[in-house]
Amino acid sequence: MNSASSSNSNSVTVANSTVLLIENDRNVSAALNDILSDFGLRVLLAYDGLEGEELYRAHQGDIEMVILDWRLPRQDGRDTLRKIRQLNPNVNVMVASGYAPEEVLTQLDDQRPITFLSKPFNIDKFLDKVHQLLA
């Protein structure tokens, strides 16, 4: 899973950026944390929607991007996204979900634009999208 090396040339432009990763699967969260850290990013981790919202409130001045799972305990991705966007309507958001893109996009209401990535995903494609959002 360590294909981050192919994208390391991109890390110069995004190094030291802070990403909030909201993902309830601890194995996925750990793997993505390692990949993003190898990419030169600072990662804040939350395992449910309420924790993600609280971390965003506490660090919103530092967070340049949110990676958001759609199905989360305590507060789903839709409500978490809405509350984060109330704090910062311009925050870069990538929704990573096993749901069909159409299903998630119809639930977004006025919460666009977002970047959507279907799970499971290719690590290089994931890193390319992260770089695009942070560039």
Image: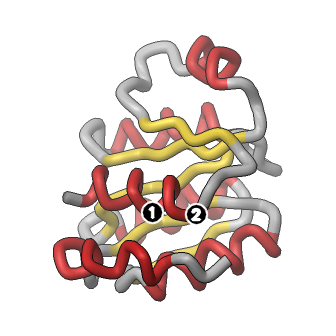
Secondary element type, mark 1:
helix
Question: Which of the pair 23/48 is nearer the observer?
Answer: 23
Give the class, few, some or many, for how many residues have Cα within 10 Å of label 1's Cα (few <14, many ≥20).
many
Q: Name the residue under label 2.
A: 123
| Above or below: residue 117 compared with residue 44 | above
**Residue 113 placement (x, y as % from top left):** 36, 28
Mark 2: which secondary structure?
helix
Q: Where is residue 29 in the image (x, y as percent from the top left)?
A: 70, 71
Q: Nearer the viewer, residue 124 or 25?
A: 124
Residue 11 at x, y percent in the picture: 28, 78
Residue visible at 51% across and 62% down in the picture = 124
Which quadrant of the view contains residue 26?
Answer: bottom right
Residue sitting nearer the eye, 16 or 130: 130
Q: Quadrant of the C terminus?
A: bottom left
Q: Check residue 103 in the rendering and tell me which mark sits there, or answer none.
A: none
Q: Is residue 44 left or right of residue 26?
A: left
Dot 2 surroundings within 10 Å: few (below 14), some, or many (20 or more)?
some
Q: In which quarter of the image is residue 87?
A: top left
Give the residue drawn at x 25%, y 40%.
90
Position of 14 with respect to 19 (left or right) is left
Q: Name the kind of residue labelled 1 in the image.
A: Leu
Given contact means CB atoms under 8 Å apart, are the residues at marks 1 and 2 in contact?
A: yes
Residue drawn at 44 percent across, 83 percent down: 5
The vertical placement of 103 against 116, above or below, is above
- Calculate the distance from the C-alpha at mark 1 to the C-alpha at mark 2: 6 Å
Residue labelled with disc 1: 127
- Way the structure is coloured: secondary structure
* Rendered-image quadrant of the N terminus: bottom right
Q: Where is residue 54 in the image (x, y as percent from the top left)?
A: 54, 62
Residue beneath the point at 37% across and 37% down: 86
Q: Please, what is the three-letter code of the amino acid marked with disc 2?
A: Ile
